[in-house]
Image: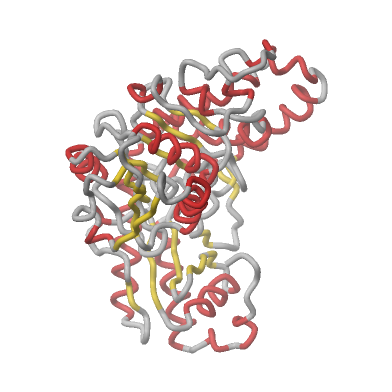
Amino acid sequence: MDLNDPLARFRERFKIPADRVYLDGNSLGALPHGVTERVTRLIEQEWGDELITSWNSNDWIGMPTRVGDRLGRLVGAAPGQVVCTDSISVNLFKLLSTALMLRPDRKRILSQRDNFPTDLYIAEGLASLLGPDRCTIKSVPADALLHALDESVAVLMLSHVNFRDGSLHDMQSVTKIAHERGVLVLWDLAHSAGVIPLELDEWQVDMAVGCGYKFLNGGPGAPAFLHLAKHHQQRAAQPLSGWMGHANPFAFRPGYEPAADIRRFLAGTPGILGMAALDAALDVFDDVSVKEIRQKSSALTTLFMKAVSKLDLPGIRVITPSDPAARGSQVSLAHENGFEISQALIDAGVIVDFRAPDIVRFGFSPLYNRFADAQLAAASLRRIVEEQRYLDPAYSQRPQVT
């Protein structure tokens, strides 16, 4: 399968330690070699030699929208609808506030009960700030979402791919049903941007957020992105009215006047080092389609799931959907000693992560993961579980980041 892989050539564009099988790309993508060159040039030349003039001479000031448009191409959004800025958490706060303003006769945020915690935490914080007369939250199981879409809901906030089990929502159909009921939809694309084909314009998606450090390989803490459909932009207002969102930031006038386009969702001065790293990482995607990436992703996860199933390991349950069309680019296994198993795998050179309460998560990045990586991970898992290596007390010590 590796010999016949049309994407095999991309692996050499990344720094991959030879002694490890890296299956954590859904938490932190590997380093593209081009990022090192770009950031070094920025530090030594643009910052070191050209100093503050680089805001103009190297167009630092235009990076949020320029990088945003590059991200837009990956998620099916025409130029002028995506901006690279802040973190997912901050961008969720902006867009949830915007959604409530766009639906002043409604006050409810609806979400999935096992959505990624930061999404729910931000919604809770906004509800606390605005009070129950203006904002309430309702979270329900996935199978109850459509039933809960009533006239009280202003916005439906969902993660496209569930971070725990890897299950995938049908974005197009869910968005269509929500719109039929007068509800705006805000999608979190953290685990799908760059690995699953998306058509935000075609599917008439209102709003979306995503991060740059997972499958987009932008580096730890890379800036996030925010999408708002063009037809909402003139009517939209966001609460973080910082100077970079002003119509003319360098006029320094009293009183806030928002920019006429997606730039109104900027706030403070952009972090150029992080954005430059993400911009360079996106160069890899210039030579490949997300459709091709998705095909390999499905093949990788299918191979790994079949290997695990054949092993019939005691206590191991595959909780990711078996249908490739119903899952993202990860496979989640549950075991009562999931944390200890994850640590034993890492110690054996198979880098995975753990998600409470009992999930070992294998994230496959098709641009650099080989089919051999899936087989090696399964073989390592077999040894650790069958020989009960995970019972070593050393593997029960929990670090701050799991």
Image quarter in which the C terminus is found: bottom right
Residues 102 and 113: in front is: 102
User: What is the x, y in percent for residue 16?
Assistant: 58, 52
User: What is the x, y in percent for residue 58?
Assistant: 67, 17
Q: Residue at x 45, y 38 (%)?
A: 97
Residues 27 and 312: in front is: 27
Image side of residue 162 versus residue 322, left or right: right
Q: Residue furthest right?
A: 49
Image quarter in which the N terminus is found: bottom left
User: What is the x, y in percent for residue 224?
Assistant: 53, 39
Residues 55 and 39: in front is: 55
Depicted 102 relative to depicted 317: above or below: above
Q: Which residue is drawn at 47% across and 43% down?
A: 92
Depicted 96 relative to depicted 261: above or below: below
User: Can residue 322 be seen in this snapshot?
Assistant: yes
Q: Residue at x 44, y 63 (%)?
A: 362
Colour logic = secondary structure
Q: Which residue lies furthest to the front in this view?
A: 133
User: What is the x, y in percent for residue 172?
Assistant: 23, 41
Residues 115 and 154: in front is: 154
Tally of marks: 0
User: Can residue 291 be seen in this snapshot?
Assistant: no
